[in-house]
Amino acid sequence: MNELIIGGARSGKSSLAEARAAESGLRVVYVATAQALDGEMTRRIAHHRARRPATWGLVESPLDLAVALRRHAAPDVCLLVDCLTLWLSNLLFAGAAARQAEAGETVDCPRLAGEVAALVECLPRLPGRVILVSNEVGWGIVPMAAVSRLFADEQGRLNQRVAAVCERVTLVAAGLPLVLKQPA
């Protein structure tokens, strides 16, 4: 079964995902999308790493997520992807999209479109279990900066597409899970 866990910053979504992975009874492989590009992110990564069991595997995949999932999925494995939000940000800044948005140009995101399509296509076909964590960023004000608007738009589209192919979708607010979609 595939599950998308969404919520705001510090809502408890990663903790819920980690608990669900631990309860799965499967071998857990943590798929990290973060990159330690500054001190703050280095500390955040260390915090997440410290609370995970040492027995969990780790795959770092800041850009090629579908490839990593296909490579590591197995019937006896639970892949925990944390998080789609950082993955999206990595993709926007890896190419010209962020720079185009900041310059007021028409944004062309072929790599982003290809990576999202590959993810959405592979998820229903993967053996085992996949738990994906993502931020819900669409409940705030419309950002003033063009690159921030691009990010919010793409994050909303990504969440919708992933939710459509997941059997369960859970929203987390204040540490409390609310199941939005589940198998019948």
Image (cartoon, rainbow, N blue to C red):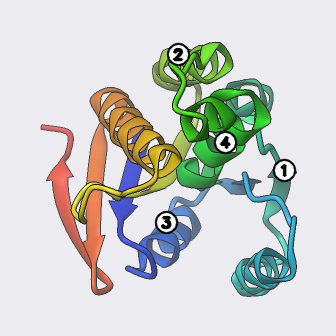
Point out the tag, 2 or 1, that comes first from the N-terminus.
Answer: 1
Q: Amino acid at mark 3?
A: Ala
Where residue 108 sits: x, y (%)? Answer: 57, 16
Which residue is found at the position 56% from the left and 70% from the top? 18
- Nearer the viewer's eye, disc 4 or disc 3? 3
Could you tell me how far apart the alpha carbons at marks 2 and 3 are, in whole angstroms?
A: 23 Å
Q: Are marks 2 and 3 in contact (CB under 8 Å)?
A: no
Q: Is residue 129 left or right of residue 4?
A: right
Q: Amino acid at mark 1?
A: Glu
Report the residue marked by disc 1: 60
Q: Secondary structure at mark 1?
A: strand
Residue 117, disc: 2
Point out the tag, 4 or 2, that comes first from the N-terminus.
Answer: 4
Point out the tag, 4 or 3, that comes first from the N-terminus.
Answer: 3
Report the residue marked by disc 4: 76
- Nearer the viewer's eye, disc 2 or disc 3? 2
Q: Quadrant of the rendered structure where residue 130 is? A: top right
Could you tell me how far apart the alpha carbons at marks 3 and 1 are, in whole angstroms?
A: 17 Å
Q: Mark 2 packing: few (<14 Cα in 10 Å), some, or many (20+)?
A: some
Q: Is residue 143 above or below residue 178?
A: above
Q: Amino acid at mark 2?
A: Ala
Q: Is residue 94 above or below residue 22?
A: above
Q: Amino acid at mark 4?
A: Asp
Where residue 181 sits: x, y (%)? Answer: 18, 45
Q: Is residue 16 left or right of residue 44?
A: left
The one of 120 and 135 positioned closer to us in this rendering: 135
Which residue is found at the position 68% from the left and 18% from the top? 111
Point out the tag, 3 or 1, that comes first from the N-terminus.
Answer: 3
- Nearer the viewer's eye, disc 1 or disc 4? 1
Q: Mark 4 packing: few (<14 Cα in 10 Å), some, or many (20+)?
A: some
